[in-house]
Image: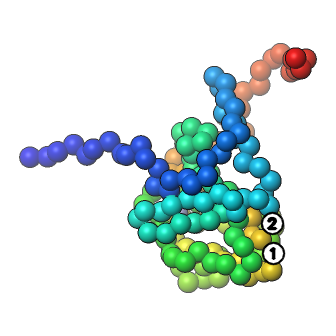
Amino acid sequence: MSTANPAPAKTPNFPQHTPVADRDAGPNFSAARVGPLKDLIRYAVDSPRLGLTLPGKVFLQDVLGLTGMEVSLGLMPPHASIPFLHKHDQNEEVYLFLRGRGEMLVDGRVVPVSEGTAVRVAPDGVRCWRNTSDDDLVYLVIQAKAGSLEQWTGTDGIGVPEPPSWPTPA
Ligand code: ZN
């Protein structure tokens, strides 16, 4: 006898300590003002599964109601490191480094990273990253189901004929 799998829990894997307070939304958009990147350290998330707290991390999937990807912003203080290795079941990740200098470790290979470096890691890649500099390392992580992109972004966009009309501020 088989039992249907229960629906995935709505509780995020990483409960956010510090909520993103400044938010806005309309029928077709949602916005979150996380604040200056240099102040990201005021955010933190818990990882019950790993039994630790990650400072300087904001996950945006819940905040924005994202349906096809997870996006997080992270700040790692000078000479800090993620204290564990992880991989994924289905999602590939792109790490996009916005500030600072550090290294990623992927399957035992070291990849130097700095502002402007983008690193894709396949689900099976066993990964970690660290800040090797005296400055903050600021980065963005986007994850989406590997192989899920079925259209090219250049042909998915559809031009709308009217010119932009900006409302006058009230
Ligand atoms: Zn990950």
Residue 29: x, y in percent? 67, 30
Which residue, given by chain and number where applicable, does mark 2 sit on? 99
Quadrant containing the C terminus in the rendered view = top right
Residue at the spot 56% in from the left edge and 59% down from the top edge: 45
Amino acid found under the numbered disc labelled 2: Arg
Residue 34 disc label = none
Residue with the mark numbered 1? 135
Q: Name the amino acid type tagged 1.
A: Asp
- Residue 76 in the image: state x and y as whole percent: 69, 70
Q: Are marks 2 and 1 in contact (CB under 8 Å)?
A: yes
Q: Secondary structure at mark 2?
A: strand
Crowding at dot 2, Cα within 10 Å, few <14 / some 14-19 / many 20+, comes out as some
Under circle 1, the secondary element is loop
Within the image, what quadrant is residue 129 found in? bottom right
* Quadrant in the rendering for residue 62: top right
Taking the spot 60% from the left edge, 60% from the top edge, the residue there is 44
Residue 104 image offset from top left, x and y in percent = 65, 76
In the picture provided, is 39 more to the left or to the right than 57?
right
Classify 167 as above or below 72: above
